[in-house]
């Protein structure tokens, strides 16, 4: 039996193309819905792509401050255990 049959893909939220006009509440709801779905599928983590900010002002991902604020709140209220901020490579990993 091929052991790759038991490997589940990592759930991914791609915020890279959302831009600066997306609201805080939209992001929070999107993250929460994805976390709930991932947990129900027995995943233990997910990835949020924010981009590296290479084409943004100050060379920073445009949504990173909103994303961090939301994730810090999720850590504080126990929705997630923790997250790894790897924005230098354009993504964050969320653990629950």
Image (cartoon, rainbow, N blue to C red):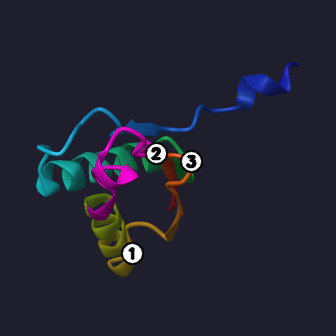
Residue 9 forms part of the magenta stretch: no
| Residue depth check, mark 2 versus mark 1: number of the one nearer the observer | 2
Give the class, few, some or many, for how many residues have Cα within 10 Å of label 2's Cα (few <14, many ≥20).
some
Q: Which structural element holds mark 2?
A: loop
Residue 53 forms part of the magenta stretch: yes
In-front residue for pair 60/24: 60
| CB-based contact (under 8 Å), mark 2 and mark 3 | yes
Quadrant housing residue 24: bottom left
Residue under label 3: 89
Q: Residue furthest front?
A: 58
Q: Determine the CA span between mark 2 and mark 1.
A: 28 Å
Q: Residue at x 33, y 40 (%)?
A: 15
Earlier in the chain: of badge 3 and badge 1, it is 1
Earlier in the chain: of badge 2 and badge 1, it is 2
Q: Determine the CA span between mark 3 and mark 1.
A: 26 Å
Left or right of 50, for residue 83 = right
Q: Position of residue 11 (x, y in %)?
A: 49, 38
Residue extent of the magenta highlight: 48-65
Q: Which residue is drawn at 35% across and 80% down?
A: 76
Q: Determine the CA span between mark 2 and mark 3.
A: 6 Å
| Residue depth check, mark 3 versus mark 1: number of the one nearer the observer | 3
Residue 37: numbered disc: none
Instruction: Check the picture and name the quadrant holding the N terminus.
Output: top right
Residue 78: numbered disc: 1
Give the class, few, some or many, for how many residues have Cα within 10 Å of label 3's Cα (few <14, many ≥20).
few
């Amino acid at each position: 039996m091929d052991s790759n049959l038991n490997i589940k893909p990592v759930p991914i939220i791609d915020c890279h193309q959302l831009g600066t006009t997306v609201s805080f509440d939209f992001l929070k709801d999107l993250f929460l819905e994805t976390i709930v779905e991932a947990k129900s599928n027995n995943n233990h983590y997910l990835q949020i792509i924010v981009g590296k900010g290479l084409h943004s002002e100050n060379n920073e991902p445009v949504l990173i401050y909103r994303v961090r604020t939301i994730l810090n709140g999720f850590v504080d209220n126990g929705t997630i255990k923790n997250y790894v901020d790897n924005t230098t490579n354009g993504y964050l990993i969320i653990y629950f």
